[in-house]
Image (cartoon, grey):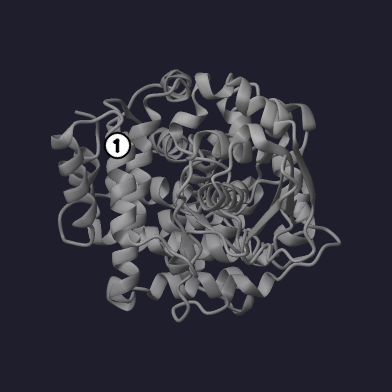
């Protein structure tokens, strides 16, 4: 397929030309190194997710469509390429502990990595091809999310599902050898598949866990159709009925962000690794609560009232509906509850995966303290550039203690180091795997970028 003038001038065309021409030597070494550690974080989370019930349900649902030869991260199963991508996305994102590109408000690895991996194994590509495709998928996902100017959540769309589909199509298309025109077409095709509703917030349904895997599968599908000659609308982003006009009608958007800085600004470096296993919008509040607790020796029984200031857009995600936020019904509700995050941090003096287990959810002290939390709009929030949180705690002796986290930890201005990411990886994979498996997986991930087959990497990252 040749690139005509119309396609070349479209945003999808700009992305297609950049991705088609990009080689691994064009990516700065520091970007490739950080990419390996983002993959390490993602694979560790995939393993850790297998300790929960939702991966088995996803596996059983996908098994109904028949088996295949593609390995699954952290599991012994083998599925078709597209189904393996779905399950890998579920595994990486299922605990909501995976990385987030802050301005894009998008979990970028959870869709880009499964799509790149499935395509690389299917085509016999090398780990260098896999790593490059993953990086490019992250770059596109991040830019599509940035173009939404923080508005996708406000209208009920999960940007990971929306933006992730475009990144996945790009990653899969790169591995499978699409030219610039075909890559543009793949974006045009996947635009009709990019969606993911936030209605799960009302009752704790599992749909969000499926979003990045579905985005990965959609990307693989779109790339295959484009390779076969299927056309897609060139103006899928900026057109009259393009992504931003339909998903964010009447709101501020920045479609031009999709093509901005390609090859010069590496958005992957702005991807935040989560220090806490909760919604990223709650992280500043966990840090604020723990900071105040340690600095002032706060005892939960001395807390009279708590005021939490947050931007209204993320605020609606973590404080509505009130019934689910002030009295979480399960660990998934708790992940998205600002009151529970603050209360558990003050009571337990930490927030780890243990604070999402049944004993913490039923803890009378945590539940009582959560009822004392009130949420209000924060006019000084940096959202969407950062996920700010302001906390005021009134104590029984009359003192009012305050702390603001204007830039959340993990943000590119306050990044976790590679050593801290590795420590997190050992903690997550260590919940289900021994030292031998942990060391094998670490070695395979940190060697990404060589000439070995991507299938060898995939095999090394299976259970066992």
Q: Quadrant of residue 64?
A: top left
Q: Quadrant of residue 435?
A: top left
Q: Give the number of callouts.
A: 1
Residue 224 visible in the snapshot: no
Residue 22 vs residue 128: left or right? right
Q: Nearer the viewer, residue 221 or 250?
A: 250
Q: Residue 39 in the image: x percent, y percent?
A: 34, 52
In the rendered image of this protein, does residue 404 appear above or below residue 7? above
Kindly state the secondary structure of the residue where label 1 is placed.
Answer: helix
Q: Which residue is mark 1?
A: 429
Residue 64 vs residue 234: left or right? left
Determine the residue positioned at 83% across, 58% down. 249
Q: Nearer the viewer, residue 99 or 421?
A: 421
Q: Residue 386 in the image: x percent, y percent?
A: 61, 63
Q: Residue furthest right?
A: 250
Determine the residue positioned at 68% across, 38% down. 303
């Amino acid at each position: 397929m040749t690139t005509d003038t119309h396609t070349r001038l479209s945003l999808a065309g700009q992305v297609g030309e950049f991705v088609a021409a990009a080689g691994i030597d064009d990516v700065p070494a520091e970007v490739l190194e950080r990419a390996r550690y983002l993959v390490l974080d993602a694979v560790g989370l995939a393993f850790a997710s297998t300790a929960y019930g939702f991966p088995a349900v996803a596996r059983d649902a996908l098994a109904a469509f028949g088996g295949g030869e593609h390995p699954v991260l952290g599991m012994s199963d083998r599925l078709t390429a597209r189904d393996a991508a779905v399950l890998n996305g579920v595994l990486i994102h299922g605990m909501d502990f995976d990385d987030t590109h802050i301005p894009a408000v998008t979990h970028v690895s959870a869709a880009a990595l499964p799509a790149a991996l499935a395509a690389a194994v299917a085509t016999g590509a090398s780990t260098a091809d896999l790593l490059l495709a993953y990086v490019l998928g992250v770059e596109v996902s991040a830019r599509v999310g940035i173009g939404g100017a923080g508005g996708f959540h406000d209208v009920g769309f999960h940007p990971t599902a929306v933006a992730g589909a475009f990144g996945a199509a790009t990653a899969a298309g790169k591995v499978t050898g699409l030219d610039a025109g075909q890559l543009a077409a793949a974006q045009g095709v996947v635009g009709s598949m990019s969606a993911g509703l936030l209605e799960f917030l009302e009752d704790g349904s599992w749909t969000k866990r499926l979003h990045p895997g579905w985005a990965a599968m959609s990307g693989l599908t779109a790339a295959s159709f484009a390779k076969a000659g299927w056309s897609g609308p060139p103006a899928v982003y900026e057109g009259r009925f393009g992504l931003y006009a339909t998903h964010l009608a009447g709101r501020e958007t920045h479609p031009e962000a999709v093509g901005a800085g390609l090859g010069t600004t590496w958005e992957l470096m702005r991807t935040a690794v989560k220090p806490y296993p909760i919604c990223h919008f709650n992280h500043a509040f966990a840090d604020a609560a723990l900071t105040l607790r340690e600095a002032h020796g706060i005892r939960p029984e001395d807390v009279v009232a708590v005021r939490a200031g947050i931007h209204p857009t993320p605020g609606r995600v973590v404080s509505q509906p009130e019934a689910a936020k002030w009295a979480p019904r399960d660990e998934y509700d708790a992940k998205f509850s600002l009151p529970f995050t603050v209360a558990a941090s003050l009571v337990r003096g930490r927030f780890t995966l243990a604070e999402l287990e049944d004993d913490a959810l039923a803890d009378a002290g945590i539940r009582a303290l959560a009822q004392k939390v009130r949420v209000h709009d924060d006019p000084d929030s940096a959202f969407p550039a950062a996920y700010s949180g302001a906390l005021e705690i009134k104590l029984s002796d009359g003192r009012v203690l305050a702390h603001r986290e204007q830039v959340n930890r993990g943000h590119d201005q306050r990044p976790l180091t590679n050593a801290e990411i590795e420590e997190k990886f050992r903690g997550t994979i260590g919940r289900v795997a021994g030292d031998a498996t942990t060391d094998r997986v670490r070695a395979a991930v940190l060697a990404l970028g060589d000439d070995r087959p991507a299938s060898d990497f995939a095999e090394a990252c299976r259970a066992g």
